[in-house]
Amino acid sequence: MKIIEPDGIVREAQQFLSPFCDARPGADAVELVVLHGISLPPGRFGGPWIERLFTGTLPEGQHSYLDASIGLRVSSHLLITRPGELLQFVPLARRAWHAGLSRFGDRMRCNDFAVGIELEGCDDIPYTEPQYRCLTSLLRTLIGHYPELDPTRIAGHEHIAPGRKTDPGPAFDWQRLERELGVPRPCTQPSPYAG
């Protein structure tokens, strides 16, 4: 199990704090975890590009896809790399900008009440053993820390923004997550999307 500090920092995570966050509105508590898949450039793993994207420090001239991403104001709370390293960009008590236009059940704007976890990967390449181990430990910690969060409130970006997003994609093993958490299957049905 990991430790969450009072300020929302996960003690075991490397810190790369992002400017792309703000206060959660009102008294919104964490009630949802959104799993994402990301690789920069697409289909390539390793390198500093995800960290540079989330911290607003992408340099020009490295790759055309990266050049097109310069100026994006996006972030996630956490990233799990292919080797299973945990990086944090936004304290959990703050709102990261990861979900965009989204809906979970009858609630819109999932950023307001969700923790965003990026997995370094893409829709059609299997995620790694170290990533699943890190993710399972992290999810157990989050479920234990937030009273409103339970395993039925873990969704993919594809479930909260169907038709707009596809990650973490078919390569993500939801059944494995169910077995490892030892609880009923997390949410894998798309929410009715009111765009």
Image (cartoon, helix red, strand yellow):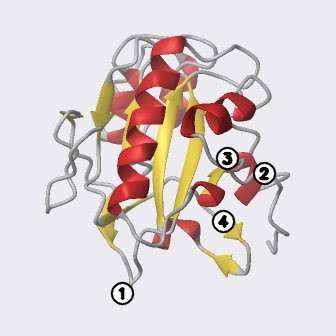
Q: Earlier in the sequence, mark 2 or mark 1?
A: 1
SS class of the residue under badge 4? loop
The residue wearing badge 2 is: 164
Q: Residues within 10 Å of mark 1 (few under 14, many from 20)?
A: few
Question: Is mark 3 in CB contact (under 8 Å) with mark 2?
Answer: no
Res 15 quadrant in image: top left
| Residue at position x 39%, y 53% in the image | 142
Q: Amino acid at mark 3?
A: Gly
Q: Earlier in the sequence, mark 3 or mark 1?
A: 1
Res 140 quadrant in image: top left
Res 99 quadrant in image: bottom right
Alpha carbon distance from label 3 to label 2: 12 Å
Q: Earlier in the sequence, mark 4 or mark 2?
A: 4
Alpha carbon distance from label 1 to label 4: 21 Å
The residue wearing badge 1 is: 27
Alpha carbon distance from label 3 to label 1: 24 Å
The residue wearing badge 3 is: 156
The residue wearing badge 4 is: 101
| Residue at position x 44%, y 49% in the image | 74
